[in-house]
Image (cartoon, rainbow, N blue to C red):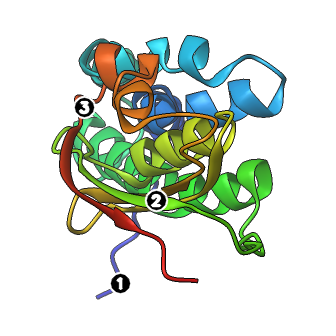
């Protein structure tokens, strides 16, 4: 006995569109930065992440409830089709597309650091929840005058910044708008750079 499963295309489309809208909080700032919008302005998208996720869910549900009842899908109403496609696109957007896009926007090469009197600042950033957060923070730091290099690690929610103390200070770095308005950061330690 072979079962035929037709996928309700309207519910599938709703799930995909909803997933893209919901995951925009992660990759949206990267796209806006790529288009030339300054990093902090583009991070307004991140500040309202919950509204984007709710909007994405609403869009997916509206499409699934408005799907025609004459097609057979995973469920007659198309809800399961919408939920599966929503979740798949959301996860791909946040955990696959965003890290790849961050490499395109900010580059992956580590800068060659010329010997100097640099300081190494380690920050704790507990508000990071996804790779989009990490990429946005790293981009903002690398575009800060006096910052020689920055490396953000999502797994331990920390950031290591190498900076030139003759140009900037640890206080200026911690008080960057990205940290004061979106991702609060605290200093774990500061030490001399051993290059």
**SS under mark 3:** loop
Whether residue 65 appears in this view of the structure is no
Identify the image quadrant of the N terminus: bottom left
Contact flag, marks 2 and 1 (Cβ < 8 Å):
no
Q: CA distance from mark 2 to mark 3?
A: 59 Å
- Looking at the rendered image, the disc whose residue lies closer to the viewer, 2 or 1, is 2
Residue 8: image location, x then y, percent: 45, 42
Q: Residue at x 24, y 36 (%)?
A: 185
Q: Residue at x 77, y 72 (%)?
A: 114
Question: Is 19 in front, or is 45?
Answer: 45
Q: Earlier in the sequence, mark 2 or mark 1?
A: 1
Q: CA distance from mark 1 to mark 3?
A: 22 Å
Residue hosting label 1? 2
Residue hosting label 3? 77
Residue 145: image location, x then y, percent: 69, 34
Left or right for 31, reference 67: right
Q: Residue at x 31, y 17 (%)?
A: 180
- Looking at the rendered image, the disc whose residue lies closer to the viewer, 1 or 3, is 3
- For the image, the number of numbered tags is 3
Q: Earlier in the sequence, mark 1 or mark 3?
A: 1
**SS under mark 1:** loop
Identify the image quadrant of the C terminus: bottom right
- Image quadrant in which you'd find residue 100: bottom right
Left or right for 99, reference 171: right
Q: Residues within 10 Å of mark 2 (few under 14, many from 20)?
A: many
Residue 128: image location, x then y, percent: 27, 44
- Image quadrant in which you'd find residue 183: top left
Residue lying at the far right in this picture: please name it: 35
Q: Residue at x 50, y 30 (%)?
A: 24
Q: Which mark is residue 105?
A: none
Residue hosting label 2? 119
- Looking at the rendered image, the disc whose residue lies closer to the viewer, 2 or 3, is 2
């Amino acid at each position: 006995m072979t079962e035929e499963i037709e996928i309700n295309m309207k519910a599938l489309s709703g799930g995909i569109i909803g997933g893209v809208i919901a995951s925009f909080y992660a990759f949206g700032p990267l796209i806006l930065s790529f288009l030339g919008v300054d990093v902090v302005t583009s991070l307004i998208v991140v500040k309202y992440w919950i509204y984007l996720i709710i909007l994405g869910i609403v869009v997916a549900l509206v499409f699934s409830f408005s799907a025609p009842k004459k097609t057979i899908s995973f469920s007659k109403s198309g809800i399961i089709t919408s939920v599966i496609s929503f979740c798949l696109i959301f996860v791909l957007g946040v955990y696959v597309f965003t890290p790849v896009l961050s490499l395109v926007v900010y580059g992956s090469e580590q800068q060659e650091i010329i010997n100097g009197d640099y300081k190494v600042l380690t920050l704790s950033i507990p508000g990071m929840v996804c790779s989009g957060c990490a990429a946005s923070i790293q981009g903002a730091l690398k575009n800060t005058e006096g910052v020689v290099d920055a490396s953000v690690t999502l797994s331990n929610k920390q950031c290591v910044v190498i900076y030139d103390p003759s140009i900037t200070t640890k206080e200026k770095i911690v008080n960057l708008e990205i940290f004061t308005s979106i991702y609060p950061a605290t200093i774990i330690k500061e030490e001399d750079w051993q290059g």
